[in-house]
RNA sequence: GCCCACUUAACUCAGCGGUAGAGUGCCGCUUUCACACGGCGGAAGUCGGAGGUUCAAAUCCUCCAGUGGGCACCA
C-alpha cells in the first residue's frame, strides 16, 4: 500500500465534500428513523455581498461540529443555509458597478435597477456559499434560502400586515437618524457613537429683549453652532436661581431676527455649560422631545444633504453644515456675541456603514411599537429561562436592552429590499395589504401608488428561523424543525438580530425560535485588535486553509473558548502537525493491517485482556464521555483538548508503542491479527470522535480501513454508502472505564519515564542497553510490572529487567530512584556514573519531596483542618505524606549507598 | 457616567475552592524500520496589586490599577 509520509490536505478536501453533498448526507432525509430526535440550526445568513472572514469560519466551525456530532448520534439534523439581501451594502455594490459605466441608479430607474441587482446576485452572489463549501460545512443546500426569495418575502408582508392591523406599526413624522451619504434613515442600532477628541464647545450670547433698553445677554453652550439658526427656545432648569427671573422672557435670536422664549425644563442640567440650553427641535433628538413637551415650533434649517435650507437665511442657504458652522461663528464674533470657544471631547453619531456624521432630521417614516413583543421576550426569559445564553453573562445584556427598548424605525429610503406593502390613493389615504390586489379591494380604486420605501434588512432577518421553514404555511419543515436547537453568533448582533428573532418568533409562531444562544468569542489580530476591513488587519481564512489545511484551521478555531483570542499561526501549525500525527498513526496501522479487521480483537471479557488493552479502552471511553459532555455545554476547547491528548499521548505515544512488538511481529498468526485489529479498532473509534472537528482527514483515512462498511453506520442511516459522517458517534461505555487499569498503567508509565530520565541525566547513549532492577514490595504492582516486562524492556531500551519484591545487592555505581507506591528502581551503570552528579540528583529529588512533605504536614498538624475538612481529603493527604516519607527514606539510603 | 469581560510560564490560552496546566518557544540528547510537521528528557509562574471570607483561595467577596467591549439625549 502506497501512503505518503506527510498528509496533504488538498486532495481530501477536494474530493469528499462534493461526494457528501451529492449523496444527500447533509439533508435530514438521510435519516430513516421516524422516531429520531431532531436537531436544527438556522445559519446566521451572511450578506450576499460578503466574502468569508474569520468570524464566519469560527461560527461555522462550531455549528458544523454540533451538527455533525448530532447527526452521528442519530439525530435528524437540519442545518439550514442561506444569505441575506443586505439592503444598503448590495445597493451600493451595484451602484458602484453602474458608476463604472458612468450611470447612476436614477438613470436606470427603480425597476431596471432592481433587475440589475438580481442579475448581480445571480452572477456574483454565490461567492460566499462557494467559500463555505470549502470549510466543509454540512448544511443542507437543498433548503438554501435568500431573504428576498418569494417565500420569505411573503412572510415579510404577512408580518407587516398583521403588525399594522394590530396597531403595532404606524407611520408618522419623528426625529430620526439620517445618513446624508446613504440618503436613508437608520435605526438606532445602525448608528455608532464615536468619541470626537478635537471637539469644540461654543459659547454663544443671545441678547434678551428687556423693553427698557438695557443690555442683558444669555449665554448658551453648543457643539453645533449652525443649528442656532433653527432655535425656537432657550431652556433653563426651573430651580436655577441664576435664571429664575428670565423664565418667560424673550430672547432676540441673532442672525435671524426671530424672537424666541426662555422656557423651564427639568431636563436641563444647571451644572453643565452655562446652565442654559439652546433648543433646536428640528435638528436634535433631545430638543425634539423638549419641543414636543413645550409645543415649540420646528424650524428646518438643514436638509437631507446636510446643507442649509432657505429658512436658514439668505446668507446660509446652500452651505454645507460645516461651512455654515464656520460662518455662524464668524458672524457671532463680528457681533461681539461669541463669548468663548473651549476644547471639548464628546460622542458623535456616525453611520455604522459609511461613517458619515448622522444628521438628526424630522421625517415621515414607518415605525414598530415594540412593547408587546418586548414583553413576550422578557416573559419567555423570566418564566422559562429561554433562550439560554452561553456564556450566561449575555443574558443581562439582552435583558437590559429589552427593558429600554424604543420604537423601531423600519422604513429605509432604498430600492433594494422588501418594498413596504402600503399603498396610497390619490387623497393620500393609506392601505396596508398583502399585495396590490388586496389593497385595491380595500381602497375601492385601482389608482394606487405603493410606498417607495423598503424595510430595514433586519426586519426580514428577524423572521429567519421560521420564514425559512415555510411560514406562514404550516409546513412539515416548520413542524419538524422549529424551534431550532441553538443559535451560534457573535455578540455584536444580540440586539440587532437575536432579540428580534425572539420577539418575532414569539409573536408569530407562538414559540421561541431557539433553545440556546451560544455567543462566540472574537478572533483578534496578532496585536489584539479586532479584525476589520478599514484597518486591513484581517486574516483570510482561505489563505490559512491553503497553508495549513481546513481541518487544522477548524481545530484551532474550535479550541477558542468563549473569550476573545488573538490569532496565532503557530497554533494552527500545531494542529497541522496533529493532523500529520493522525495521518502517520493511521499509516502505521494500515501498513500493518494484513489479516486485521476493524471491530475485532477485543473479544471476550475485558478481564482477560492485556493491561494496555484494558487501559486504552478505558481512555477511549473516558474521552468519548468527556467530548460528549463538553459539546453539550458548548465547551469546544475542552473537547479539542480531550481528543488531542487522547490521540497523541494515549494512543500514539503509549498504546502504539506498547503494542508495537505484537503488531509488527514477523510471524503471521491469530495473535498478530488480533493485535493489529485492536490498533485499527481504536483508531477507527478515534476517527469517529474526531470527525465533527476534522471532517476531511477522518473521512480520508476511515474509508481506507479494512472492515469498515455499511455495518459501521448508525442504524438511522441504513442503506447509505459508507462514510464516517454517518457512523455512530462513540458513546462512553461505563463498563469499560477501568480506574484500576488506568492506575496500573500509570505505574508502568512512571516506571518507564523514570528510567528514561536516569538515562538522559547520566548521558547514557540511546543505543546503549541498560539493565534495570525494579522492587515493588509485596503489592500488586510486582505482577503488573512482571506482565509488562517485554514492553518495559523495549520502551526503556533495556537488555534485561528484573522485578522482585526487594532490591537485591547492587554495585555502588548504580543509579536509583524511588517512585510512588513504594516502588524502587535501580540501573547499574558501571563506568558511567559520576558519583557527585548522582548524589546531587538525589539531593534535588529529596529536596523537592521534603518541601511538599512540609506543606502537607503543616496542614495535617492544623487541628482546624483535620476537624473541618472532609475526611477523605484528610485521608488523602495522610496517604500522600506516608508515600513521600517512604520515598524520602529510600532516597536517603540510595544516597548512603553512593558514599560507601 | 453606568454596565460587563479580561489580567496565570517568553508568547497564545485552559483551569475557576483542596498538590499550578497545555500548545508554541527555550535547553539537552536523538535521524531505531508510522511520523524531524517526529521521539525522549528538562528548565521555566510569589496565577495584575491590596485587603477580606475559609481549615484551605489562581479559583469566592471588596477596593484599586491596566486592557478590551457594550450602554448613555448632558447641549
Image (cartoon, coloured by chain):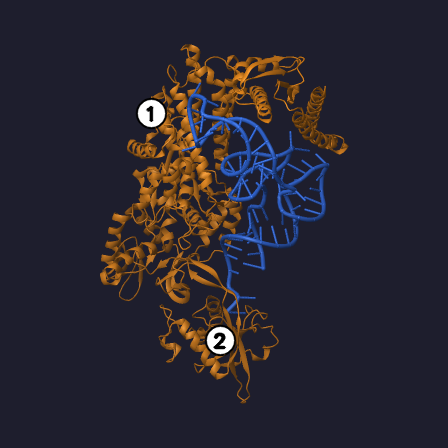
Chain colours: A orange, B blue
Q: Residue at x 48, y 83 (%)?
A: A335
Of the two numbered discs 1 and 2 in the rendering, the one whose residue sits closer to the viewer: 1
* Tag of residue A861: none
Q: Which residue is mark 2?
A: A233
Residue extending farthest to the bottom is: A213
The reply to whether callout 1 and callout 2 are in contact (CB within 8 Å) is no
Q: Position of residue A384 (x, y in %)?
A: 50, 42
Using the image as rendered, state which of residue A561 and residue A713 is in the foreground: A561
Q: Residue at x 25, y 48 (%)?
A: A123
Picture disc at residue A722: 1
Q: Secondary structure at mark 2?
A: strand
Question: Of callouts 1 and 2, which one flags the residue occurring earlier in the amino acid sequence?
Answer: 2
For disc 1, the neighbor class at 10 Å (few under 14, some 14 to 19, many from 20) is some
How crowded pointer 2 is (Cα within 10 Å; few <14, some 14-19, many 20+) is rated as many
In the rendered image, the vertical position of residue A754 relative to residue A171, given as above or below: above
Inspect this view and state whether residue A220 appears: yes
- How many numbered marks have been drawn onto this rendered protein structure? 2
**Along the viewing direction, whichever of A144 and A771 lies nearer the viewer:** A771
Q: CA distance from mark 1 to mark 2?
A: 78 Å
User: Please, what secondary structure does the residue beneath circle 1 have?
Assistant: loop
Image location of residue A569, percent across then percent down: 44, 41
Q: Position of residue A242 (x, y in %)?
A: 60, 77
Residue, x 26% and y 51% (percent of image)?
A: A120
Q: Residue at x 37, y 70 (%)?
A: A303
Q: Nearer the viewer, residue A28 or B16?
A: B16
Amino acid at each position: 500500500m502506497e501512503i505518503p509520509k506527510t498528509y496533504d490536505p488538498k486532495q481530501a478536501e477536494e474530493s469528499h465534500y462534493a461526494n457528501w453533498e451529492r449523496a444527500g448526507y447533509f439533508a435530514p432525509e438521510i435519516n430513516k428513523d421516524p422516531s429520531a430526535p431532531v436537531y436544527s440550526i438556522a445559519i446566521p445568513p451572511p450578506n450576499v455581498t460578503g466574502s468569508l472572514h474569520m468570524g464566519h469560519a469560527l461560527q461555522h466551525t462550531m455549528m458544523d461540529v454540533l451538527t455533525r456530532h448530532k447527526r452521528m448520534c442519530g439525530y435528524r439534523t437540519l442545518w439550514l443555509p442561506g444569505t441575506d439581501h443586505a439592503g444598503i451594502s448590495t445597493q451600493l455594490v451595484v451602484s458602484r458597478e453602474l458608476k463604472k459605466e458612468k450611470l447612476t441608479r436614477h438613470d436606470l430607474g427603480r425597476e431596471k435597477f432592481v433587475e440589475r441587482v438580481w442579475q448581480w446576485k445571480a452572477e456574483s452572489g454565490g461567492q460566499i456559499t462557494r467559500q463555505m463549501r470549502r470549510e466543509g460545512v454540512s448544511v443542507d443546500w437543498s433548503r438554501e434560502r435568500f431573504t428576498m426569495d418569494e417565500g420569505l418575502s411573503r412572510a415579510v408582508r404577512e408580518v407587516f400586515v398583521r403588525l399594522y392591523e394590530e396597531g403595532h406599526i404606524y407611520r408618522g413624522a419623528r426625529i430620526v437618524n439620517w445618513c446624508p451619504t446613504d440618503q436613508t434613515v437608520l435605526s438606532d442600532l445602525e448608528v455608532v457613537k464615536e468619541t470626537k477628541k478635537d471637539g469644540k464647545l461654543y459659547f454663544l450670547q443671545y441678547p434678551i429683549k428687556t423693553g427698557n433698553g438695557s443690555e442683558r445677554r444669555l449665554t448658551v453652550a453648543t457643539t453645533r453652532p449652525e443649528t442656532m439658526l433653527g432655535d425656537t427656545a432657550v431652556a433653563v432648569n426651573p430651580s436655577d436661581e441664576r435664571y429664575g427671573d428670565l423664565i418667560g422672557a424673550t430672547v432676540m435670536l441673532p442672525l435671524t431676527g426671530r424672537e424666541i422664549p426662555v422656557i423651564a425644563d427639568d431636563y436641563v442640567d444647571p451644572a453643565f455649560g452655562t446652565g442654559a440650553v439652546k433648543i433646536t427641535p428640528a435638528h436634535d433628538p433631545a430638543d425634539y422631545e423638549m419641543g414636543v413637551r413645550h409645543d415649540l415650533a420646528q424650524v428646518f434649517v438643514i436638509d437631507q444633504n446636510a446643507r442649509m435650507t432657505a429658512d436658514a437665511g439668505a446668507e446660509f442657504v446652500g452651505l454645507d453644515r460645516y461651512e455654515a458652522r464656520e460662518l455662524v461663528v464668524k458672524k457671532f464674533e463680528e457681533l461681539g456675541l461669541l463669548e468663548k470657544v473651549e476644547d471639548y471631547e464628546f460622542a458623535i453619531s456616525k453611520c455604522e456603514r459609511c461613517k458619515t456624521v448622522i444628521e438628526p432630521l424630522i421625517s415621515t417614516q414607518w415605525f414598530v411599537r415594540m412593547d408587546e413583543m418586548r414583553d413576550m421576550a422578557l416573559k419567555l426569559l423570566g418564566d422559562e429561562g429561554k433562550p439560554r445564553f452561553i456564556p450566561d453573562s449575555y443574558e443581562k445584556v439582552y435583558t437590559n436592552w429589552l427593558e429600554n427598548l424604543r420604537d423601531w424605525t423600519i422604513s429605509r429610503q432604498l430600492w433594494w429590499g422588501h418594498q413596504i406593502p402600503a399603498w396610497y390613493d390619490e387623497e393620500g389615504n393609506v392601505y396596508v395589504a398583502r399585495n396590490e390586489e388586496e389593497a385595491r379591494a380595500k381602497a375601492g380604486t385601482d389608482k394606487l401608488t405603493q410606498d417607495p420605501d423598503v424595510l430595514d434588512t433586519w426586519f426580514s432577518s428577524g423572521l429567519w428561523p421560521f420564514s425559512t421553514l415555510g411560514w406562514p404555511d404550516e409546513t412539515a419543515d416548520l413542524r419538524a424543525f422549529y424551534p431550532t436547537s441553538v443559535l451560534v453568533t457573535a455578540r455584536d448582533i444580540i440586539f440587532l438580530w437575536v432579540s428580534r428573532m425572539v420577539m418575532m418568533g414569539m409573536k408569530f409562531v407562538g414559540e421561541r425560535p431557539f433553545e440556546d444562544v451560544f455567543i462566540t468569542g472574537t478572533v483578534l489580530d496578532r496585536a489584539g485588535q479586532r479584525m476589520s476591513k478599514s484597518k486591513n488587519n484581517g486574516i483570510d481564512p482561505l489563505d490559512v486553509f491553503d497553508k495549513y489545511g481546513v481541518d487544522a484551521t477548524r481545530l484551532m478555531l474550535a479550541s477558542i473558548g468563549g473569550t476573545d483570542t488573538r490569532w496565532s499561526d503557530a497554533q494552527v501549525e500545531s494542529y497541522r502537525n496533529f493532523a500529520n500525527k493522525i495521518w502517520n498513526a493511521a499509516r502505521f496501522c494500515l501498513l500493518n493491517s494484513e489479516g486485521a479487521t476493524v471491530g475485532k480483537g477485543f473479544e471476550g471479557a475485558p478481564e482477560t485482556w492485556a493491561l494496555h488493552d484494558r487501559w486504552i479502552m478505558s481512555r477511549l471511553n473516558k474521552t468519548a464521555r468527556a467530548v460528549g459532555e463538553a459539546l453539550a455545554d458548548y465547551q469546544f476547547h475542552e473537547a479539542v483538548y480531550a481528543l488531542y491528548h487522547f490521540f497523541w499521548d494515549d494512543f500514539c505515544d503509549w498504546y502504539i508503542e506498547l503494542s508495537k512488538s505484537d503488531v509488527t511481529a514477523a510471524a503471521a498468526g491469530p495473535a498478530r491479527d488480533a493485535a493489529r485489529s485492536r490498533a485499527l479498532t481504536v483508531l477507527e473509534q478515534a476517527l469517529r470522535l474526531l470527525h465533527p472537528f476534522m471532517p476531511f482527514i477522518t473521512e480520508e483515512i476511515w474509508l481506507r480501513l479494512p472492515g469498515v462498511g455499511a455495518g459501521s453506520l448508525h442504524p438511522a442511516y441504513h442503506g447509505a454508502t459508507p462514510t464516517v459522517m454517518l457512523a455512530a458517534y462513540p458513546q462512553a461505555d461505563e463498563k469499560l472505564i477501568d480506574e484500576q487499569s488506568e492506575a496500573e498503567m500509570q505505574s508502568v508509565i512512571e516506571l518507564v519515564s523514570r528510567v528514561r530520565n536516569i538515562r538522559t541525566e547520566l548521558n547514557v547513549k540511546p543505543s546503549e542497553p541498560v539493565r534495570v532492577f525494579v522492587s515493588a514490595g509485596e503489592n500488586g504492582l510486582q505482577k503488573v510490572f512482571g506482565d509488562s516486562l517485554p514492553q518495559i524492556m523495549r520502551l526503556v531500551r533495556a537488555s534485561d529487567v528484573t522485578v522482585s519484591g526487594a532490591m537485591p545487592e547492587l554495585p555502588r555505581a548504580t543509579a536509583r530512584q524511588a517512585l510512588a507506591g513504594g516502588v524502587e528502581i535501580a540501573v547499574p551503570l558501571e563506568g558511567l556514573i559520576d558519583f557527585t552528579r548522582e548524589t546531587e540528583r538525589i539531593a534535588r529529588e529529596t529536596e523537592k519531596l521534603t518541601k511538599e512533605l512540609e506543606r502537607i504536614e503543616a496542614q495535617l498538624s492544623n487541628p482546624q483542618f483535620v476537624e473541618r475538612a472532609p475526611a477523605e481529603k484528610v485521608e488523602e493527604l495522610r496517604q500522600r505524606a506516608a508515600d513521600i516519607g517512604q520515598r524520602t527514606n529510600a532516597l536517603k539510603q540510595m544516597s548512603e549507598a553512593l558514599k560507601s
